Image (spheres, rainbow, N blue to C red):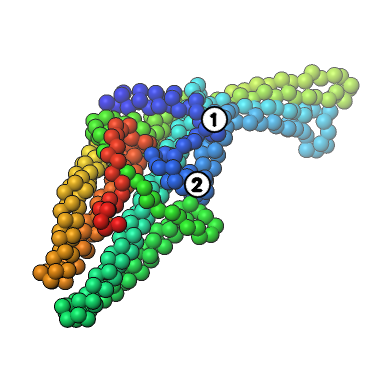
């Protein structure tokens, strides 16, 4: 299993390194599927969001570190005076007195620089995955808020229609009461319902303002702007293949790629720890210039060279513990990777189940319950007008019809919200087969429009 994970990490490096140095084409489109209006909001958020900008800047900074990590240390230049007598401080008194210039270069053990470069590259890949995960999270948050705003818009429309219906019924009740065929309590009940609807409207408008503020905040706008809620979403029957979606999540989920880079980093640290058992070398070359002696005899200059290396003598307290620590780090990273790999298919299955159940609920309401509620509302109103039904029963039938329509809207928006949640787990737009049902949000019988 460990060999598979290591090979997977190498393949991941090979695929992603090519695109790391060309930031202009990164994340050109919305990370998740979205209608045009929502896609515009998401793209605005991805450009303006400060946390996204911070992560992008961090990634660019890590890219700059890649060549630095694989480079040699700067050579060291030395200037020295050797064997200068202190009684005269004369440069021609002693033959061994010399003025020396030297240059030294530290050379790490073979392969260390390449490993440092790889480690820096893996950091870039990890940061890129973190950035992608944040973009997906932001897109999902904007989408969820947008769809919730759409449901609030439907709630306001339902509240308005219900207010118009109750006003109409109030006029009927007042007429019946004035002619002695109705009860005063019918008039009072209609007035109470109108007051309740007014209070509900205030609450809904408050919720709409809160959601609009949230979208403006996610988009980092300088001032408040009105966000038009979706009003023309169609019911799309999603053909969900759990096995294919789980496979997509395992391939593209950015959180899983982050875990993979942790394994890659741990493996590189292991290789570096093993190379610490071998010495780094420090090469030094020096040129020593000598003056003529007191007799005028010319003295030859000196050339010197040396190699200094560290001796891994204290392995029990240095190299061995470091290697053991890196092995434990890799084990922890592999366990974390396997844990997420196992949990992703279950998360996908749970969301798919919710979408399927919500689609069935929506179909039940639009195909059955709305028709039945509409028939009940019309028959109740007809019965009340001829005096064979109580006002309260008739009013409840009208309210139930509109509440059923609102619940159908809620199911529709929930399907869109769950799709956004699913695509965050998948790491991008879902590869779905869809069949349009052409069922428009909030279907209203012609008689009630």
Spatial distance from mark 1 to mark 2, Cα to Cα? 24 Å
Above or below, 414 against 313 in this view is below
Decide which of 26, 329 is in the foreground and name it: 26
User: Number of callouts in the render?
Assistant: 2
Few, some or many C-alpha atoms within 10 Å of disc 1 (few <14, some 14-19, many ≥20)?
Answer: few
| Residue 141 percent across, percent down from the top left | 38, 50
Few, some or many C-alpha atoms within 10 Å of disc 2 (few <14, some 14-19, many ≥20)?
Answer: some
Left or right of residue 74, residue 114 in this image: left
Q: Mark 1 or mark 2, which has the lower sequence index?
A: 1
Q: Is mark 1 on a helix, strand or loop?
A: loop
The residue at 33%/56% (across/down) is: 154
Q: Is residue 357 visible?
A: no
Which quarter of the picture shows residue 21?
Answer: top right
Q: Is mark 2 on a helix, strand or loop?
A: helix
| Residue 180 percent across, percent down from the top left | 17, 81
Q: On the image, numbered disc 2 is attached to which residue?
A: 44
Decide which of 336, 370 is in the foreground and name it: 370
| Residue 340 percent across, percent down from the top left | 28, 38
Above or below, 389 against 9 in this view is below
Task: Point out the residue furthest to the left here.
Answer: 388
Q: Residue 21 carries which label?
A: 1
Left or right of residue 327, residue 27 in this image: right
The residue at 67%/23% (across/down) is: 285
The residue at 39%/33% (across/down) is: 261
Task: Point out the residue furthest to the right here.
Answer: 296
Quarter of the image containing the C terminus?
Answer: bottom left
């Amino acid at each position: 299993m460990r060999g598979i994970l290591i090979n997977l990490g190498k393949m991941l490096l090979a695929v992603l390194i090519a695109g790391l140095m060309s930031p202009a084409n990164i994340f050109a489109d919305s990370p998740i599927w979205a209608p045009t209006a929502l896609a515009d909001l998401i793209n605005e958020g991805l450009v303006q969001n400060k946390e996204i900008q911070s992560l992008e800047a961090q990634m660019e900074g890590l890219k700059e570190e890649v060549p630095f990590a694989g480079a040699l240390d700067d050579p060291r230049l030395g200037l020295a005076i050797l064997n200068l007598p202190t009684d005269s401080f004369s440069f021609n008194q002693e033959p061994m007195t010399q003025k020396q210039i030297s240059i030294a270069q530290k050379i790490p053990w073979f392969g260390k620089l390449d490993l440092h470069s790889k480690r820096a590259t893996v950091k870039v890949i990890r940061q890129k995955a973190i950035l992608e995960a944040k973009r997906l999270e932001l897109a999902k948050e904007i989408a969820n808020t947008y769809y919730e705003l759409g449901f609030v818009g439907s709630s306001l429309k339902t509240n308005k229609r219900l207010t118009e219906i109750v006003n109409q019924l109030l006029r009927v009740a007042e007429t019946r009461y004035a002619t002695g065929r109705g009860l005063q309590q019918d008039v009072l009940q209609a007035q109470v319902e109108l007051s309740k609807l007014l209070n509900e409207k205030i609450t809904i408008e408050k919720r709409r303002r809160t959601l609009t503020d949230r979208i403006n905040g996610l988009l980092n706008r300088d001032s408040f702007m009105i966000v038009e809620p979706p009003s023309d979403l169609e019911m799309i029957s999603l053909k969900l293949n759990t096995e294919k979606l789980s496979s997509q999540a395992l391939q593209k989920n950015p959180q899983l790629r982050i875990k993979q880079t942790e394994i890659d980093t741990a493996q590189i640290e292991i290789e570096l720890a093993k190379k610490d058992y071998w010495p780094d070398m420090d090469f030094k070359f020096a040129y020593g210039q000598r003056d003529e002696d007191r007799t005028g005899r010319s003295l030859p200059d000196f050339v010197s060279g040396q190699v200094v290396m560290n001796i891994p003598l204290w392995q029990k307290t240095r190299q061995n513990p470091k290697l053991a620590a890196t092995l434990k780090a890799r084990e922890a990273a592999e366990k974390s990777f396997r844990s997420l790999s196992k949990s992703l298919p279950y998360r996908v299955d749970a969301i798919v189940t919710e979408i399927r159940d919500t689609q069935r609920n929506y179909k039940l309401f639009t195909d059955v319950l709305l028709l039945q509620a509409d028939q009940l509302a019309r028959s109740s109103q007809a019965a009340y007008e001829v005096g064979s039904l109580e006002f309260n029963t008739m009013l409840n039938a009208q309210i139930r019809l509109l509440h059923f329509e609102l619940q159908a809207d809620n199911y529709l928006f929930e399907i869109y919200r769950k799709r956004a949640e699913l695509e965050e787990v998948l790491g991008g737009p879902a590869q779905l087969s869809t069949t349009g049902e052409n069922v428009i949000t909030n279907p209203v019988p012609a008689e009630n429009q």
